[in-house]
């Protein structure tokens, strides 16, 4: 079965075809349709094989990760199980700032080697494009360093990488008592430099009690837009802090998390065309109710599903697991979750013209999965069901996967 995940008809419509063929050349899809209707001119092309009644889907897109970080925080995982909150742990010196220290003291080589290994493991899970955020550097130099590591990763391995500047992730220690000074540094020094060096396509900010206010985020995202960086937002994750309204006001390409989004916020997102990125692994790890995906979809908001991979709230990059949670915890159907991890995820990172569905003209990024249908794949959950991942028409080999 070939699930094309084409755009029309909304979140639940994946436009699946049985006995279908996929034709590609030079890394680009030429044709998809019923096997019996294969155009004559394709007969001169080499055939790459038969998927033998397996499921073929577009390459999965993880549209929200914090990939480059030093260290881990498994002790905080236990502390939260024992009832200490995420915010309390941060106030005691843990949380994001602890990872900032570990990241600053890791070498470029160490950070890069970790990212390479994880990207290879993601590819084995069917992921072909990943959005990667900075945000554990929090100085001009360190944020640029992380984005440069991402830029080099693009040359070193096949998974596509889209970079986002998230300097407004937490207030660095050095600026305690001088919030405005940090915002100024980000807006006036860092953002223009990131844009000049073309190190990121997007600018993101974390609006939350203990992080940044909506006004601070507006200043940062506006500075980003002035330099050509499209805005994204960590919105309404732990409380309703007006994140969705700000995302809609600025025309953000995506509003991410949204666990605490209000009814009014949902309506505003629907009007602005912003993609809601649901991150159910983070909700699961924090033991909190996830974003109201059903209500978002019913109001006409496209909902993408991603992992949020980071050492605090989502220490897993298993996108199919996030899709399972979207189904069980958020009442998305498996087909809705698939469209959320393909076409709508592509839309959330401005890549819809290039990937996210199996259509002529798009990159031949696809995955063969050992399951007879989308429902069966997600329902009979196994750690690793893809039998092959193709990026731009080339099979990702075990060697690329670091095995
Ligand atoms: O998306 N919300 C802010 N940032 C991350 C968590 C980062 C961390 O705890 O290290 C998130 O959940
Ligand atoms: Fe995040």
Image (cartoon, helix red, strand yellow):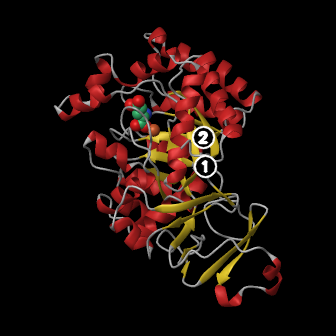
At horizontal 68% and vertical 33% (from top left) the residue drawn is 151
Distance in Å between CA atoms under marks 1 and 2: 10 Å
Q: How would you rate the neighbour count of disc 1 (Cα within 10 Å): few for under 14, some for 14-19, many for 20 or more?
A: many
Q: Please, is residue 51 above or below residue 191 in the view?
A: below
Residue pictured at 76% horizontal, 73% vertical: 46
Please give the label number shown on residue 272.
none
Label 2 crowding class (10 Å Cα cut-off): few <14, some 14-19, many 20+?
many
Q: Which of 152 and 356 is in front in this view?
A: 152
Secondary structure state at the residue bearing disc 1: loop
The CB of the residue at mark 1 lies under 8 Å from ligand 2:
no
Q: Name the residue under label 1.
A: 349
Circle number at residue 231: 2
Question: Ligand 2 is located in which of the four quadrants?
Answer: top left
Mark 2 secondary-structure assignment: strand
- Which circle, 1 or 2, is nearer the viewer? 1
**Residue at (64% x, 86% y) in the render:** 34
Residue 385 in view of the camera = yes
Q: Where is residue 385 in the image (x, y as percent from the top left)?
A: 44, 61
């Amino acid at each position: 079965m070939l699930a094309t995940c084409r755009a029309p008809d909304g979140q639940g419509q994946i436009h699946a075809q049985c006995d279908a063929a996929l034709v590609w050349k030079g890394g680009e899809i030429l044709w998809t349709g019923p096997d019996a209707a294969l155009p004559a001119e394709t007969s001169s092309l080499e055939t790459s094989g038969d998927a033998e009644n397996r499921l073929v889907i577009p390459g999965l897109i993880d549209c929200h990760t914090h990939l480059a970080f030093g260290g881990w925080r498994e002790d905080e995982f236990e502390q939260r199980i024992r009832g200490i909150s995420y915010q309390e742990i941060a106030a005691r010196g843990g949380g994001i700032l602890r990872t900032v220290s570990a990241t600053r003291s890791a070498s470029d080589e160490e950070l890069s080697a970790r990212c390479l290994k994880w990207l290879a493991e993601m590819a084995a899970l069917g992921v072909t494009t990943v959005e990667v955020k900075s945000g554990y550097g929090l100085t001009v130099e360190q944020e640029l360093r992380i984005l440069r590591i991402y830029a080099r990763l693009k040359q070193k391995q096949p998974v596509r990488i889209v970079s986002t500047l998230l300097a407004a992730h937490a207030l660095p220690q050095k600026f305690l008592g001088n919030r405005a000074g940090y915002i100024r540094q980000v807006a006036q020094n860092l953002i223009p430099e990131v844009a000049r060096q073309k190190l990121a396509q997007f600018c993101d900010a974390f609006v939350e009690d203990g992080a940044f206010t909506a006004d601070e985020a507006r200043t940062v995202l506006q500075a980003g837009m002035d330099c050509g960086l499209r805005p994204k937002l960590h919105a309404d994750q732990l409380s309703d802090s007006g994140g969705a309204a700000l995302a809609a006001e600025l025309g953000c390409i995506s509003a991410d998390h949204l666990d605490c989004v209000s009814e009014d916020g949902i309506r505003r997102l629907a009007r602005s065309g912003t993609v809601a990125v649901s991150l159910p692994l983070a909700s699961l790890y924090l033991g909190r109710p996830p974003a109201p995906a059903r209500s978002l979809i019913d109001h006409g908001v496209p909902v993408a599903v991603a992992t949020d991979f980071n050492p605090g709230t989502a220490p897993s990059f298993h996108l199919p697991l996030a899709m399972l949670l979207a189904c069980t915890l958020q009442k998305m159907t498996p087909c809705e979750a698939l469209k959320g991890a393909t076409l709508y995820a592509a839309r959330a990172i401005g890549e819809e013209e290039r990937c996210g569905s199996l259509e002529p003209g798009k990159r031949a990024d696809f995955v063969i999965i050992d399951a007879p249908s989308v429902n069966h794949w997600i329902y009979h959950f196994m750690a690793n069901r893809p039998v092959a991942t193709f990026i731009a028409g080339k099979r990702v080999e075990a060697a690329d996967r670091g095995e």
